Image (cartoon, rainbow, N blue to C red):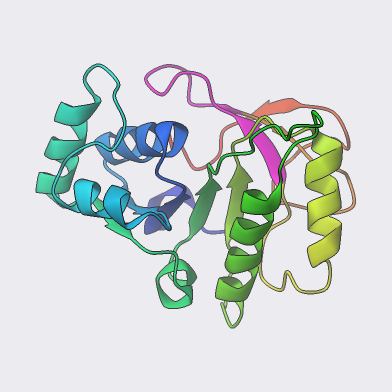
Amino acid sequence: MKPDDEIGTIGVVGAGYVGCITAACLARRGRRVIAFDTDASKLALLSAGKSPVLEPGLGELVAAEVAAGRLTAAAPERAALHGVDVAIVCVSTPSMPDGSVDVRPLRRALGSLTEAAAGRATPMLVIVRSTVAPNLLRALWKELDGQAGPLAAAASVRAHVYGGPRALWCGTDGEHDPGLPVAANRPVVHEVFKLI
């Protein structure tokens, strides 16, 4: 992992409600952020300095950060994803008619990041910001086991207040070392690169 002052670019995968807010707030903290999405209309709005979602104050924040050059938008292509130091996955995980969770968007995002991380000299830290249960996330990572290459292991993360404490709640399955001092299967608080 790179020290806090050496982190160049943060990629936020998914520019919907959670992702757009995440990207804009991290950019406001002075980080260089790329919001990735497969929806061309969201990318066009963000590139024009407009928010694709309605949230009080977000439109102004997006406009300011795009104008400052800290927030950009791109399609999740391998070359663009390859250059991020930290990837925060904020894709939707809707409920299926039978009550199960549709993890296909999350599977695609993690697969794209796995491919993009190939050939990196340093690991890419991947943070999954989702309501997906840890066992489902663990299963997705096991599907990618052996393909992950220079990805740091998955951590389920919740960051509640961007303007508040600089801490993330992290949990790991204990089989992978995400480079954070976390106890197996137990959430702990740890500052991660002072991203927020």
- In this view, 24 is above or below 85: above
Estimate the x, y position of residue 11 in percent, counting from the top left. Answer: 43, 54
Q: Main secondary structure of the magenta part?
A: loop
Image quadrant for the C terminus?
top left
Q: Is residue 77 above or below residue 18?
A: below
The single residue placed furthest to the left in the displayed view is: 67
User: Looking at this rendering, what residue extends furthest in the front direction?
Assistant: 97
Magenta-tinted stretch: 155-168
**Is residue 123 visible in this depiction of the protein?**
no
Query: What percent of the width, then of the height, locates residue 181?
Result: 74, 40
Residue ID at (43%, 58%): 38
In this rendering, the answer to whether 42 lies above or below 134 is below
Q: Nearer the viewer, residue 187 or 65?
A: 65
Residue 16 image-quadrant placement = top left
Residue 113 lies in quadrant: bottom right
State the residue in front, 43 or 34: 43
Residue 129 in the image, given as x and y percentages of width and height: 59, 37
- Magenta residue check for 50: no
- For image coordinates 36% across by 38% down, the residue present is 20
Query: Who's the residue at 26% across and 35% down the image?
Result: 28
**Farthest bottom residue?**
119
Q: Quadrant of residue 27?
A: top left
User: In this view of the protein, which residue sits in the foreground, 91 or 148?
Assistant: 91
- What residue is rendered at 73% in x and 69% in y? 148
Q: Is residue 26 left or right of residue 165?
A: left
Q: Is residue 28 visible?
A: yes
